[in-house]
Amino acid sequence: MAVREIRLEGDPILKKISREVTNIDERTLQILDDMVETMYAADGLGLAAVQVGILRRLVVIDIGQGPIKMINPKITKREGMTISREGCLSVPDVNGMVRRPKTVSVEYTDIEGKTVTIENAQGLLKKALCHELDHLDGIVYTDVAEVVFDMDDIEKYEELYDVKPVCRGTNSYDYETELHEVN
Ligand SMILES: [Zn+2]
């Protein structure tokens, strides 16, 4: 395994759409292993292949329950709406407030070629799924965030958006609140 270089905001590859993976070969498995190692080295919760410069629909996520390696993941159901804080390994030192569905279901192919479904993911897993799958379509969270702010200003935005922590950690994904719709 190898830690790969993470592409940063401003790199045009992050805006490109990744291609379907048609063959789960040695190279695909190697890329997934490298992505897991790169994610851990950067203390992240998720990583899309495009973030290491590879335009294939591959995502890895670990929210503290072990790595999930996903091939051609897609969202099959969305329900509700929340707003929460997100960060990205490709966009250092800032966070943003992003609207996401309250729950999503996702279908993907695993490394053995089997179809796996995650039903009604919520919270951190939901957020990581939405964030990483957006990367596959060339969308960085800063493109869709309501506001992006320097980490030094975090308390101001927590108060403004009434965002409460759902779990406490050092990562940058760990806040969520129900979205309060306003007229
Ligand atoms: Zn990201």
Image (spheres, grey):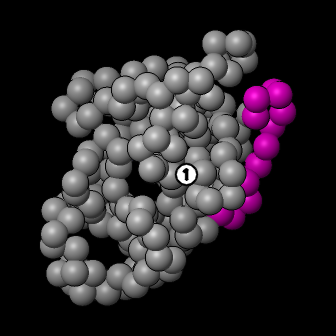
Task: Say which residue label 1 marks.
Answer: 129
Give me the residue at 31% from left, 40% from top.
Answer: 90
Magenta-drawn stretch contains 94: no
Q: Is residue 164 visible?
A: yes
| Spot occupied by residue 79 in the image (x, y as percentages of width and height) | 58, 67
- Where's the C terminus, which quadrant? bottom left
- Classify residue 31 as left or right of residue 9: right
Residue in the image at 31% along x and 23% along y: 13
**Start-end of magenta stretch:** 110-121
Q: Provide residue 145's location: percent of width, then percent of height.
A: 28, 58
Amino acid type shown at disc 1: Leu
Q: Which residue corresponds to the image point at 68% horizontal and 58% vertical from the top-left? A: 65
142 with respect to 149 (left or right): right
Taking 172 as reference, is 33 left or right?
A: right
Q: Is residue 71 above or below residue 148?
A: above
Depicted 73 relative to depicted 122: above or below: above
Q: Residue 128 placed where, x, y %? A: 51, 54
Q: Secondary structure at mark 1?
A: helix
Q: Split into 4 quadrants, where in the image is the N terminus?
A: top right
Residue 103 location (% of width, % of height): 60, 66
Give the answer, above or below, for where 135 lies relative to 76. Answer: above
Q: Residue at x 35, y 45 (%)?
A: 89
The answer to whether residue 104 of the structure is visible from this angle is no
Residue 116 falls in which quadrant of the image?
Answer: top right
